[in-house]
Image (spheres, helix red, strand yellow):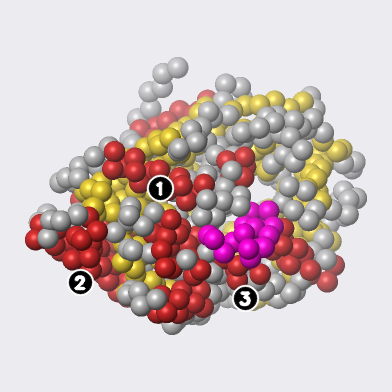
Amino acid sequence: MKFRFQLFVVLSIALAVLPAFADDPIPAREFFERSLVKDVEISPDGEHAALTFEEGTEVRLAVMNIDDQEVVQGFEFGDNMHVLGFWWASNERIVMAVGEVTGSLDGSGRVSGWYAGSIDGSRRVQIFDGSNALYTMLNPLPDDERHVLIMRRFFADGGMPKVQMLDVFNGDLDYVGNQPVDDDLAGFLADNDGELRAAFALKQGDSLDDRELRLYLRDTGEEEWDEFNLDSARPAPNVNFLGFSKDNTKAYMYSDHDIAEDALGGVFEYDFRTEESKLLFRDEHVDPAGLLRGPGGEVIGAVTRQAQVEYFLFDDLQEGAEQSVRQFQGVLGAFPGQDVSITSRSEDGTKNIVYVRSDRNPGEYFVFDTRENQLQFLIAAMPNLPKDRLVPMEPIVVTARDGLELHGFITRPAEQKQNLPLIVNVHGGPFGPWDDWGYDMEAQFFAHHGYATLQINFRGSGNRGEDFQRKGWREWGGKMQDDVTDATRWAVEQGIADPDRICIYGGSYGGYATLMGVIKEPDLYQCGIGYVGVYDLPWFRSGDGNDFSSGIRREQRQRFEAFMSSAVGETADELIPVSPVHNVEKIKADLFIVHGGSDQRVVVDHAYRLRDELDKIGKDYKWMIKEEEGHGFFDVDNRVDMYTAMLDFLDQHIGKEAETAQVSKPEDAARSRLAARD
């Protein structure tokens, strides 16, 4: 099916900057500078955009007029306080979920309260305190200027979710009745009109394997809830509601219920009129990343993200969706080779926020006007970064020693592709996160200075189904580590990496994998950089005081024990052989240890315990602690200090200085590494 669609692109020059001279090195600060924009949401009437941005240790919110791009209002909440989520409750009022984030790798942080304010600056209030309950937005109800629909988990009730109407001016709550009767209720989904239409219950046992899921659905205007039987081929399927069709007659969900083993999730459609469900889409290699909606809000397909973004159109489109398809394809045509998504739209669908990113584009936002077929530039995340001097992030496929297919990326400097000094960058998690295609500030920085970066999605990583994640359970220092080793050796076999110039690096779990890498493969890596890593595994297992293990509520302790028993290990005896602090005598590589003194996710004593053991055996190391930082450095000056120090360390051990040392002392690899260290 062919489409012809002309699209006009209007770019604002308000943020234009003069490019750096091509031969001048890009300053480190340009790679690690704070983002001018993180998220953007358009108001229901399409007149304003709310956007979050980084400032110091904060993430603040601003309101901008779309036509003239003038900022008309701002909201800030103090040091380390981030606006973690926000919604337009009406054209005039915004609701914000705010919490403390103590590090760049801290994930979603901890919500401490919800706040609301009007765009004229008036009536700013805290509408709930997060110390005794958790709130989830179900529908902002833009046609109701006073209320939003939320789900509340009150700790005193054991966390049982209840749906309520929240007054965005004074915080008053009104209970919404007629919810399914089930002692294990865990969540709800409202349709586009704010009517409760789906719910799920989850009974969790003592392990992550021991769980029972029940689903409930009801049609528009109906009182009775019907339990929905998935007829699952799996004992504990993974199901996640994705949303409703524009007319609310169909519900969409992610599910792997129909495949017994090695399952990837698919997109399923449930039709309330026929009471039938069917599979709409499943990829051969990765999970769906979500639904694809056109400018009008119609569901037109699904999206996957791994090697690059791919868009898949559904065959059975709702009436009127063809226009949305043509419009979306026109938007795609304006940004070839980039990841394009519509993140929000005005209530009438005529104005859409379009987000564009790629491996060489940190992110840009545009406004798409469907009436004029016109794209207007709104704001860029890092406008000073010269994108034309960035390099591609190349997808790779590696076969592990047991035959498992692994996906990853290699990023190489522009001027050289073979026999390179290599940084093996291991992502954190380890279960759930994954490295995907897009701008990676670390890989680009190191490529700019002549280093290749290898990133491999080892077993346990996300985006390839729960079974792939489970393959990493209880494989700390085992098969997960072997996957990293196999990918490193692949890079050597392909001629990409110089075998005598390889350094392993990672943050959080990646810091753990760094130390275990130099312990388990002492002759493979010339150096290792551990960043906010877990180094004492038995202590981590028993509860080291981090924010996950120190929860005082019974359900928090149960989740901690279930995770540790299922995914990490049971006893100290089985964890000591794969615990870095207990195996430092095996390390030959040079080390650089970096941590934040205020880390709540991986407490800094992991670094100190590692240091103590290294001191006992007289092992030298480089050391950096930033007391005010948490789980990953957030302050730009601290980031620049860290990456500048990392670059100096790399230059000494696998870069230009190490290369010179190898030439001057060309004995064997071990002697060369010794010379570089001395």
Q: Which of marks 3 and 1 is nearer the N terminus?
A: 1
Labels 1 and 2 touching (C-beta < 8 A): no
Q: Is residue 572 magenta?
A: yes
Extreme residue in the bottom direction: 627
Q: In this view, does 346 lie above or below 38?
A: above
Answer with left or right where residue 198 lies relative to residue 407: right
Q: The residue tagged with tag 3: helix, strand or loop?
A: loop
Q: What residue type is labelled 2?
A: Asp
Q: Position of residue 385 (x, y in %)?
A: 26, 58
Determine crowd level at label 1: few under 14, some 14-19, many 20+ residues with C-alpha closer than 10 A: many
Q: Where the N terminus falls, by quadrant?
A: top left
Q: Magenta stretch?
A: 563-578
Eye-nearest disc, 3 or 1: 1
Q: Distance between the residues labelled 3 and 1?
A: 31 Å
Determine crowd level at label 2: few under 14, some 14-19, many 20+ residues with C-alpha closer than 10 A: few
Q: Where is residue 133 in the image (x, y as percent from the top left)?
A: 74, 69
Magenta portion: prevailing SS class? helix
Eye-nearest disc, 2 or 3: 2
Can you identify the residue that label 3 sits on?
A: 545
Answer with left or right where residue 319 lies relative to residue 368: right
Q: Distance between the residues labelled 2 and 3?
A: 38 Å
| Badge number at residue 678 | 2
Q: What residue type is labelled 1?
A: Thr
Answer with left or right where residue 201 lies relative to residue 445: right
Query: Which residue lies at the image location 33% right of the left edge and 54% below the top edge?
Result: 523
Q: How far apart are marks 1 and 2 (CA)?
A: 27 Å
Query: Which residue lies at the image location 57% right of the left edge and 21% below the top edge?
Result: 315
Q: Position of residue 187 (x, y in %)?
A: 75, 52
| Badge number at residue 485 | 1
Eye-nearest disc, 1 or 2: 2
